[in-house]
Every structure is written in structure tokens, then in C-alpha cells.
Image: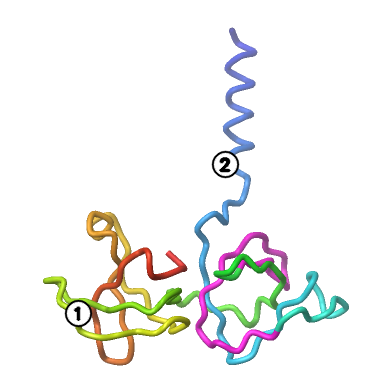
Amino acid sequence: MHYKNIISFIFVLLFLNVPSFANNFVSIKSSTTNLRAGPGKQYPINWTLILQNMPVKIIEKSNTYSKVELYDGTIGWIWNVTISEKKTLLVVRDSYIFDGKKNNIAFVKKNVVLEKLKCDELIKKTKSCKVKIDNLKGYISYKDIWGI
């Protein structure tokens, strides 16, 4: 019985020490960022990202580079200096921003970056996030965005 408790305790400790990046979204700080094949300048540049504030999902992180996933499933490494903690969302198809009464207040095109204001438990019932673009605040449906 004593061994069972020790094994359970060790398992819990190991589980707690595993870094979780499951929903760790950050955004691209600069207007151009290189997406590399590996974590260093010695690796080739596969893509150059040109959408400032675009959300990316962190999969793995080292001291200088992070392995990220883009909204279309593309995976690569970016320099940590180019990452911002600013929370943003990417519109993945033409959509509308609506007010609290579900009235459309703005049309947004695919690939527009929105500032993420709120996507918490209260809003999950409506399956929408509160967002901001320029001086306009409203809501957008989960199905039309990436980066939650």
C-alpha cells in the first residue's frame, strides 16, 4: 500500500513538471518574422511572416527560439524576440462583428487580426469572443476565428 502512494505521488510530480503549451497563444511582434526549419539561424527560412500581431500557437520553447503552429497547420521556429504576449485572434473566413444584441456592426475579411478582449466562461455560452479592431468593440463567433 505504501508503494502505491509513492508511485502515485511521483506520477503527480512528473505530470506537474511537464510544460503545457496546449493553449499558449502569443502574437508576432514585428511586421516581418522568419519561420525557420529549426531553432537557430543556421536553419533555412521556410516562410517570412508579414502579418503583424498574427496569433501563433507555441508548441515548444527554448531559450532563444519557439516552435509554433500557424492557423493553417504550418509549423516552424521563430526567434523569441519577435514574440509578443499581446492576445490577438485571426479571422479565418469573411465574417461579421456583432453587438450584444446580435446585430451586425462591422464586416471583417479573412486574415484580419483582431485584438482579443475576452473569451471566458461567460461568453462560451454564446460561442463568441469579445474583440476590438481600431475603436470598434463587439463580438465574433468562435467558428470564424483562430487563436482562442
Q: Is residue 88 visible?
A: no
Q: Secondary structure at mark 1?
A: strand
- Measured along the vertical axis of the image, is residue 21 above or below residue 7? below
- The chief SS type of the magenta part is strand
Residue 104, label in figure? 1
| Image quadrant in which you'd find residue 82 | bottom right
Q: Residue at x 72, y 68 (%)?
A: 63
Q: Residue at x 38, y 79 (%)?
A: 94
Q: Is residue 124 visible?
A: yes
According to the image, what is the colour scheme of the structure? rainbow
Give the labeled residue for mark 2. 16
Q: Gap between marks 1 and 2, in whole Å?
A: 44 Å
Q: Amino acid at mark 2?
A: Leu
Residue 45, label in figure? none
Q: Secondary structure at mark 2?
A: helix
List x then y, in percent, for residue 16. Answer: 57, 41
Magenta range: 48-69
| Image quadrant in which you'd find residue 83 | bottom right
Q: Indicate left or right for 60 with 100 as reference.
A: right
List x then y, in percent, for residue 54. Answer: 52, 80
